[in-house]
Image (tube, helix red, strand yellow):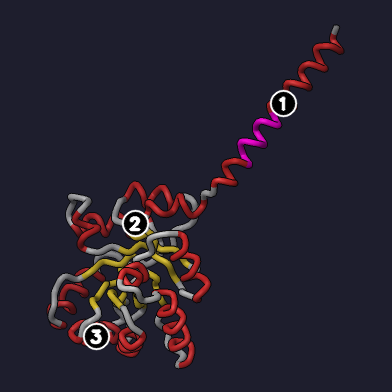
């Protein structure tokens, strides 16, 4: 499973990328706005840090304008992937862009039908939102499983990015369901590699080592006398 980092915080990206855990980055207008810096500047810097795909989202609503934006974004760096909303106009834009070999990530997918339409239109990635489905009492994990089956059934090349991941359970369920990728907020990463029993175990080892050293030093002292 590949891990994408769902943030535009460059310091956060550098920190987690140094662990070898970042296969790509996803952003959206809300995430970019928190940085207080020009959109282009932020995306280009992220692309210089991460080798994998970096999603940059269009803000237009018509296919014509989406395509114009996408062509500009794709020229910023070779690893830019253009994020397109799951709408009729979005599908039209994805179809055009796929013919130009511009990679796309269709976002805000909430059903198998939507995912299938995006894949058929030529999307490189589709992003179903687990957390937001949970909010309305629908299983995001089931959606991942069904999307994976449909993609496999028809040999589609589209990859599934599990988005709106809010806790460890979401990540583990997405992995078990066969999602190709999980895009994860930076704040969640430490919770993924941490565990109370791990911390407890380390403290226990350190205490045992301290006792051993004290005992060893005592014996050496007595022998020297």
Which residues, given as a range, are shown in magenta?
201-209
Residue 98: % across, % down: 30, 84
Identify the secondary structure beneath mark 3.
Answer: helix
Residue annotated with mark 1: 211
Image quarter for residue 62? bottom left
In the picture of the structure, the residue carrying the numbered disc 2 is 48
Label whose residue precedes the other's in the sequence (2 or 1): 2
Q: In this view, does 57 lie above or below 117?
A: above
In the rendered structure, does residue 158 fall within the stretch colored magenta? no
- The answer to whether residue 197 is left or right of residue 47 is right
Looking at the image, is mark 3 or mark 1 earlier in the sequence? 3
Q: In which quarter of the image is the C terminus?
A: top right
Residue at (35% x, 62% y) in the render:
25
Q: Which of marks 2 and 3 is in front?
A: 3
**Numbered label attached to residue 7:** none
For the image, the number of numbered tags is: 3
> Mark 3 — residue?
91
Query: What kind of secondary structure does the magenta stretch mostly adopt?
Result: helix
């Amino acid at each position: 499973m590949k891990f994408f980092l769902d943030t535009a915080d460059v310091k956060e990206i550098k920190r987690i990328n140094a662990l070898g855990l970042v296969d790509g980055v996803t952003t959206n207008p809300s995430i970019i706005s928190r940085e207080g810096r020009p959109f282009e500047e932020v995306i280009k810097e992220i692309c210089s840090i991460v080798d994998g795909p970096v999603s940059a989202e269009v803000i237009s609503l018509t296919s014509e304008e989406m395509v114009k934006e996408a062509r500009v974004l794709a020229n910023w760096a070779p690893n830019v992937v253009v994020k397109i909303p799951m709408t009729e106009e979005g599908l039209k834009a994805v179809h055009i862009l796929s013919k130009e070999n511009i990679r796309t990530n269709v976002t805000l997918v909430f059903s198998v039908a939507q995912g299938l339409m995006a894949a058929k239109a030529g999307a490189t990635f589709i992003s179903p939102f687990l957390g937001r489905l949970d909010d309305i009492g629908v299983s995001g994990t089931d959606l991942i499983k069904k999307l994976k089956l449909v993609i496999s059934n028809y040999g589609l090349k589209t990859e599934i990015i599990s988005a709106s991941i809010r806790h460890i359970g979401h990540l583990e369920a997405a992995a078990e369901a066969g999602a190709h990728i999980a895009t994860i907020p930076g704040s969640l990463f430490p919770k993924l590699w941490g565990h109370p029993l791990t911390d407890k175990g380390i403290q226990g080892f350190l205490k045992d080592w301290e006792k051993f050293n004290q005992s060893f030093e005592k014996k050496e002292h007595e022998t020297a006398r």
